[in-house]
């Protein structure tokens, strides 16, 4: 029998890894990869609380499905922006995208 | 150590190792592929939690669409096939310290909660999660409004992404 | 229950007796028996795959007015074994700048994504790998892993043609998943469940008669997913020199090729399960599971023959035409059909069967007719735009020749 704490600590570790990726990487696409890890860890938390709480109350799973939709929307718009920036500035390194307009 | 615990430990270690490789590997395409491994590990975790609809939707949406989007984006935003230069920020150690602090903080926050060692109750017989999700997503006294707003959000994201990335020739 | 009625359970109980007799704990014995069952299914599928190579070559030969392999063994039946021996003894090259791990993993993932589909195929009322209540979504998930393996193959080959071929193939696969998923929802509506076993059991009237347009759209989307002609832009010999599997030789190429054939057969099987009654044939499946397996294999072969028929008759479609066809015609049509089917299903609940079947069939025909009229008007307008300028120049050329 797996106690709830194991799932929550697993999700916290995945969240911290995603946070490290989002804060420390230079490439904009790599930053988005870190954000995806954070969203997945949140989903694990939601699913774990659904299972270990009242199974008949579907709020946890519904919330997780909405997070899927939000993550898909965010990734598509984010990557479209990154590709558009690459076309104009020929770079996706976050440090070099530092001027609004010249 | 019951079988379930061993399976969970194996899956969790695989997912965390893949996550670590996502954020540290130099080669970006490898990072995207390690992300696929992480997402698959998360899908197996959903399976362990008896949320099989979530597990399959995770594979379809995340691996089948989002991970492929990432691979496309990585391949379309580079001048040549290899990665050049440092892949980490100048202040990556601050990010590392913050990540460790976050994890330790969450850990201690959770330790103080009494429900941490809760065990899962058995699922009632004849419980069909898919029917229940369907009911929850479409019944007026459940979550039909967030469901419809999520679909509007997806249409907005679709239009926005096409408009932003459109190549006017 | 005798061996003829329920062979798998009899075999499993016998093996369980043997294993627990050796002193193994029950759970370990059950896991081992499950493993052996999976091994048996995969072995049978791979033997079937070899046979499919022979079927493919004979059928393409007949379509092209020739005989096909007929020298090696009676009717050329040993030919695929000769092919496999050739592929195995070929040198297993890895291109110079290729990414070794990804390059070697891609064919394995491609084959895996086809084999795992058979876990949800109901072979008989009692023979089903896993009775997932979300079997229909599982098919899409396996297709997603297949798309991933193609892009891994294309990128790791360190070859621009492979990369372009892989991009095109994955763009087509991801695009055509939308109408395919929508059409998979129509048997779900009729059966009230996403499980393949439940869908088969509720086909007293074959779903093809309830939703023929859905069957056609599912077939078109499935052929695009498979990457077979007329949607095989990524493998066109004249355009891309065999696309994402350029750099693969020997058995790795064999895995891609055999995987593609088995994938086509599997989708023939799914077409049969979802729209043509699966293993059911007027109660024949209750007599013995072996008759049920024979029925579903026969229907899968018919589906596979239709897919081959389409492949060897039609010309290849250009990539931008493919994507335009999907997003401008097939997806709106699929969504409209889904809405009409759901509406009719709700309105006609409780009516007698003959009325239900005929009205659903009629609604499908009406939707198809309207869609074709819209497509015809659009193409007429396009043709006038093009031929308006061409007809003028043709008249001038004619006048100059007089």
Image (tube, helix red, strand yellow):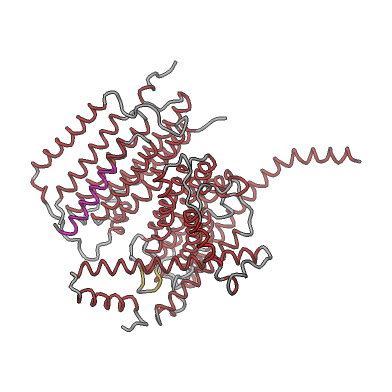
What secondary structure prevails in the magenta region? Answer: helix
Q: What residue is shown at x 29% (from left), y 56% (from top)?
A: B52
Q: Quadrant of residue C324?
A: top right
> Is A68 placed left or right of C108 in the picture?
left
In the rendered image, the quadrant that contains the N terminus of chain C is: bottom left
Does the magenta portion include B7?
Answer: yes
Quadrant holding the C terminus of chain C: top right
B147 lies left or right of C387: left
Question: In the rendered structure, which segment of residues is drawn in magenta?
Answer: B2-18
Q: Position of residue B116 (x, y in %)?
A: 11, 47
Q: Residue C221 placed where, x, y %?
A: 51, 55
Question: Against A76, is C267 above or below?
Answer: below
Count of numbered tags: 0
Kindly identify the residue that appears in the image at 33 percent across and 63 percent down. Answer: C132
User: Which residue reaches farthest right?
Assistant: C402
* Magenta span contains residue C314: no
Q: Position of residue C29 (x, y in %)?
A: 23, 69
B84 vs C216, nearest the viewer: B84
Q: Nearer the viewer, residue B51 or C247?
A: C247
Residue located at (24% from left, 65% from top): B126
Which residue is farthest top?
A102
Q: Is residue C12 left or right of residue C289?
A: left
- Above or below A100: residue C43: below
Dividing the picture into quarters, in which one does residue B105 lie? top left
Name the side, left or right, on which A6 lies relative to B130: left
> On the image, which quarter does residue B22 sit in?
top left
Is residue C182 visible in the rendered image? The answer is yes
x and y percent of residue C65 in the render?
69, 65
Report whether residue C339 is seen.
no
Q: Residue furthest bottom?
A: C2
């Amino acid at each position: 029998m797996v106690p709830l704490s194991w799932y929550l600590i697993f999700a916290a570790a995945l969240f911290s890894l995603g946070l490290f990726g989002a804060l420390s990487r230079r490439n904009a696409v790599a930053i988005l990869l870190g954000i995806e890890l954070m969203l997945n860890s949140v989903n694990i938390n939601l699913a774990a609380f659904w299972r270990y709480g009242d199974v008949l109350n579907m709020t946890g799973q519904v919330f997780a499905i909405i997070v899927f939709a939000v993550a898909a929307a965010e990734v598509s718009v984010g990557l479209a922006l990154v590709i558009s920036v690459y076309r104009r500035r020929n770079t996706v390194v976050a440090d070099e995208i530092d001027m609004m307009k010249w | 150590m019951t079988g379930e615990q061993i399976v969970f430990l194996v899956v969790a270690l695989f997912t965390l190792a893949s996550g670590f490789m996502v954020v540290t590997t130099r080669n970006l395409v490898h990072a995207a592929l390690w992300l696929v491994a992480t997402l698959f590990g998360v899908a197996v975790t959903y399976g362990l939690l008896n949320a099989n609809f979530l597990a399959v939707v995770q594979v379809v949406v995340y691996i089948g669409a989002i991970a492929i989007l990432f691979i496309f984006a990585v391949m379309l935003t580079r001048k040549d096939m290899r990665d050049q230069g440092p892949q980490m920020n100048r202040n990556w150690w601050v990010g590392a310290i913050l990540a460790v602090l976050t994890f330790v903080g969450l850990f201690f926050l959770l330790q103080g909660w009494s429900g941490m060692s809760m065990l899962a109750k058995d699922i009632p017989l004849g419980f069909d999660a898919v029917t229940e999700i369907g009911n929850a997503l479409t019944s007026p006294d459940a979550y039909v409004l967030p469901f419809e707003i999520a679909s509007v959000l997806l249409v907005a994201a679709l239009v926005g992404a096409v408009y932003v990335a459109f190549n006017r020739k | 229950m005798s061996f003829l009625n329920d062979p798998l359970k009899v075999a499993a109980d016998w093996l369980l007796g043997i294993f627990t007799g050796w002193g193994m704990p029950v759970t370990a014995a059950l896991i081992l028996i499950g493993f052996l069952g999976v091994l048996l299914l995969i072995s049978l599928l791979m033997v079937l795959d070899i046979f499919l190579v022979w079927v493919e070559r004979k059928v393409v030969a007949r379509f092209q007015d020739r005989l096909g392999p007929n020298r090696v063994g009676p009717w050329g039946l040993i030919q695929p074994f000769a092919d496999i021996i050739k592929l195995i003894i070929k040198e297993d090259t890895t291109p110079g700048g290729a990414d070794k791990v990804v390059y070697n993993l891609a064919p394995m993932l491609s084959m895996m994504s086809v084999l795992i589909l058979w876990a949800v195929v109901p072979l008989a009322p009692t023979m089903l790998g896993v009775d997932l209540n979300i079997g229909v979504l599982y098919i899409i998930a396996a297709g997603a892993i297949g798309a991933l393996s193609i892009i891994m193959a294309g990128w790791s080959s360190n070859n621009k043609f492979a990369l372009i071929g892989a991009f095109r193939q994955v763009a087509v696969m991801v695009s055509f998943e939308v109408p395919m998923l929508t059409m998979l929802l129509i048997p779900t509506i009729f059966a009230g469940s996403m499980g393949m076993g439940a869908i088969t059991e509720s086909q007293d009237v074959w779903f093809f008669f309830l939703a023929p347009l859905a069957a056609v759209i599912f077939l078109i989307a499935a052929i695009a997913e498979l990457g077979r002609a007329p949607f095989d832009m990524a493998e066109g010999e004249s355009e891309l020199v065999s696309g994402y599997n350029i750099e693969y030789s020997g058995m790795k190429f064999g895995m891609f090729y055999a995987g593609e054939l088995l994938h086509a057969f599997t989708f023939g099987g799914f077409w049969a399960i979802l729209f043509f009654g699966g293993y059911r044939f007027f109660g024949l499946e209750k007599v013995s599971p072996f008759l049920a397996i024979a029925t579903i294999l026969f229907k899968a072969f018919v589906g596979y023959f239709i897919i081959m028929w389409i492949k060897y008759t039609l010309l290849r479609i250009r990539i931008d035409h493919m994507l335009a066809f999907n997003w401008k015609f097939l997806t709106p049509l699929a969504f409209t059909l889904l809405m009409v089917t759901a509406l009719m299903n709700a309105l006609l609940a409780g009516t007698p069967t003959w009325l239900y079947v005929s009205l659903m069939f009629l609604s499908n025909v009406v939707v198809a007719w309207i869609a074709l009229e819209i497509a015809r008007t659009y193409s007429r307008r396009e043709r006038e735009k093009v031929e308006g300028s061409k007809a003028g120049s043709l008249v001038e050329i004619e006048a100059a020749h007089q």
